[in-house]
Image (cartoon, rainbow, N blue to C red):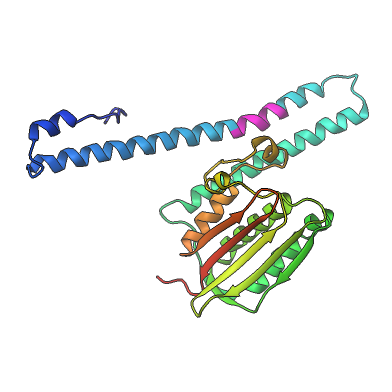
Amino acid sequence: MSQGNFNIDLSSYKEELGNRNHPFHEIVESITQMAKELGEMEQMRQDFISNVSHEIQSPLTSISGFAHALKNDHLSHEERKQYLQIIEMESIRLSKLSENLLKLTSLESAHPPFQPKTYRLDQQLRRVILSMEPQWRNKDLEMDVSLNKMTIHADEDLMDQVWINLIHNSIKFTPNNGKITVKTVKKDTDTIEVIIKDTGIGMTKEVQMRIFERFYKADPSRNRSKGGSGLGLSIVKKIIEMHKGDIQVKSSPKEGTKMKVILPIQIQS
């Protein structure tokens, strides 16, 4: 195990011990369980490194390829402009990936940034929606916004990331002339719900079960063309968990998606 081999088989020792009440039986069980968990963690680490490498390599390959193509003196003005736009787009995607990785690492550190304060949730949501107006107006989306006056105790900067990610996804995957609904509901004296619903392309049950995994993409080619890295919803889930809340998804293909964020009004220490 000290050399990284976690495929430990102690079954023969368990047979020799026989009686489960033997003092060494519990030690053998503990070592077996520890080896299994360490193996799973190592696999997760390797998968994470592999995914990061893949995500970084893709834009770097595009940037390198189109930069090389620009050396051709016979390119037309339009071709040169197109290649430069692709390089710019891929550079932005690489920067966003780096930013999200740093954000996720920060949130999962021993002392993540967390500075809750009391503020108006309805004002925050309205500000985020207005800041994204060029995106939803460009697709002629109807925004049905119903925000009751609500005060919440949370980290406003982190919750900005939640609403930006969720509303951005709704805009991204809702066709032109669609509709996005954002509303707040106070369930009781201690809990509120924020519902973000769209008339977009929707998701299968299988996809819904995995959307909060790091780097998971239901359609890698589609998300890549739209600049996604598969980290946004992982960050969203982590932030909501830090606030002792929950996020639920309900969706069907071609019937849209409803995201429900459940938060305590006051975070319990």
The answer to which image quadrant residue 56 occupies is: top right
Q: Position of residue 256 (x, y in %)?
A: 68, 54
Q: Position of residue 172 (x, y in %)?
A: 72, 50
Is residue 194 shown above or below 218?
A: below
Q: Position of residue 244 (x, y in %)?
A: 46, 64
Residue occupying image coordinates x 65% and y 77%: 148
Quick one: 260 or 164, which is closer to the camera?
Answer: 260
Query: Is residue 20 toward the left or the right of residue 211 in the image?
Result: left
Quadrant containing the N terminus is: top left
Residue occupying image coordinates x 55% and y 35%: 52
Is residue 138 shown above or below 266?
A: above
Query: Is residue 28 toward the left or the right of residue 45 in the image?
Result: left
Report the magenta residues as a range. Answer: 55-63
Residue occupying image coordinates x 38% and y 35%: 42
Residue occupying image coordinates x 52% and y 58%: 239
Query: Is residue 71 toward the left or the right of residue 92 in the image?
Result: right
Query: Is residue 58 toward the left or the right of residue 216 in the image?
Result: right
Q: How many marks?
A: 0
Q: Position of residue 188 (x, y in %)?
A: 51, 78
Q: What's the magenta bit mostly, secondary-structure-wise?
A: helix
